[in-house]
Amino acid sequence: MDADDIGHKLAALRTEHRDLDAAIVALGLVAQPDQLQIARLKKRKLRIKDEISQLGDALIPDIIA
């Protein structure tokens, strides 16, 4: 993957991360929220956050001291 591909993937993941956050908030506002569904969304959100972090690290060149 080159830097452009990584940048596009990062943008898509950040959008999905925001969308999951909005979905979690919306599910939490209902009278009887589905705790299992919320837990699954939070887990997915954490996986996406980890992937964003890994891709972000791939964009930063290694600095040899």
Image (cartoon, rainbow, N blue to C red):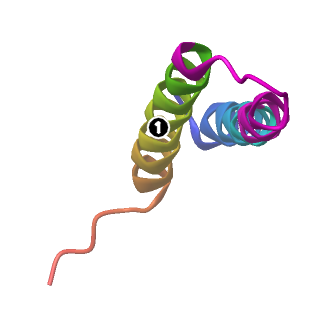
Location of residue 21 by image quarter? top right
Q: Quadrant of the C terminus?
A: bottom left
- Queried whether the magenta region covers residue 26, the answer comes back as yes
- Queried whether the magenta region covers residue 46, the answer comes back as no
Q: Which residue, as the protein is rendered here, is positioned at the far bottom?
A: 65
Instruction: Tell me where residue 60 appears, x and y as whole percent.
Output: 44, 62
Instruction: Residue at 18%, 75% (x, y): give it.
Output: 64
Residue 52 located left or right of residue 12: left
Residue 62 located left or right of residue 42: left
Instruction: Residue at 38%, 62% (x, y): give it.
Output: 61
Dominant secondary structure of the residues highlighted in magenta in the image: helix
Mark 1 neighbour density, 10 Å: few (under 14) some (14–19) many (20 or more)? few
Label 1's element? helix
Residue at mark 1: 46
Instruction: Tell me where residue 49 appears, x and y as whole percent.
Output: 51, 43
The amino acid sitting under disc 1 is: Leu
Location of residue 63 by image quarter? bottom left
Instruction: Tell me where residue 13 appears, x and y as whole percent.
Output: 67, 33
Residue 65 located left or right of residue 24: left
Q: From which residue to which does the magenta span run?
A: 20-36
Q: Is residue 64 above or below residue 24?
A: below
Work out whether residue 64 or residue 21 is closer to the camera in this orientation and state it: 21
Instruction: Residue at 72%, 31% (x, y): give it.
Output: 20
